[in-house]
Image (tube, rainbow, N blue to C red):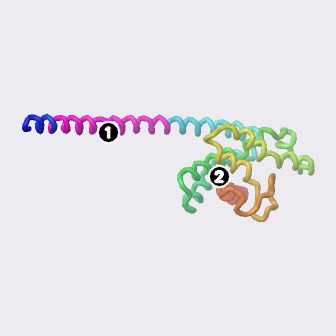
Amino acid sequence: VIERAAEHYELKRLKDRYQFHLEELVASRTAELDKALEAVENSYRLTLKALVQALETRDFETHGHSERVVTFSLRLGHELGLDKEALRNLELGALLHDIGKIGVPDAILRKPAKLTEDEWYKMRLHPIYGQRILRNIPFLEGAARVVAQHHEKWDGTGYPLKLRGEEIDIGARIFAVVDAFDAMI
């Protein structure tokens, strides 16, 4: 009986030590994975920022606009208590909000004079173009909503879908305020 109790005690001690070692190993690997995921996400951000800078070289009047609205949007999002995922969607949506301008002809985008009604119609399609560009990228799904809805207005007079009130994504609503603020300053 004493031998069996000693064996049992030794087996339990070995099992506990093995479990502790396993827990340490899992914690270590989890930390490594978290670090790798963070590096991948940072690479995505840098790539997206480079894409936005390329876009801003086509439309010189907006130089620096995307970076400013990202900063302001995140500040407002924090103040409103958005969760981590909503803040990420807001950040990437603000950064990419004008990506759809890639689909707008240069003759319209760079026109120094007032746009005609037909030209305005084509310019107002850029949120749809942006959503189409982003639609098949799963990690940008929330950002694509901001891109698609950033010109919608609370009263339903915005474009392209004439959404109103809370039909508009919260990130797009925050962004619209920030975009107007940036235009004014």
Q: Is residue 53 above or below residue 163?
A: above
Q: Image point 23% across, 36% down: which residue?
A: 15
The residue carrying mark 2 is: 69
Q: In the figure, is residue 120 to the left or right of 44?
A: right
How dense is the environment of label 2, judged by Cα within 10 Å: few (below 14), some, or many (20 and up)?
many
Between disc 1 and disc 2, the foreground one is 1
Instruction: Choose between 144 and 45: the one closer to the eye.
Output: 144
Amino acid found under the numbered disc labelled 2: Val
- Return the disc, 1 or 2, that comes first in the chain's sequence: 1
Considering the whole magenta stretch, tell me its main secondary structure.
Answer: helix
- Is label 2 in a helix, a strand or a loop? helix
Amino acid found under the numbered disc labelled 1: Glu
Is 20 part of what is drawn in magenta? yes
Location of residue 4 by image quarter = top left
The residue carrying mark 1 is: 23
Q: Is residue 7 visible?
A: yes
Marks 1 and 2, how far apart in space?
43 Å
- Is label 1 in a helix, a strand or a loop? helix
Q: Is residue 32 above or below residue 127?
A: above
Residue range in magenta is 9-38
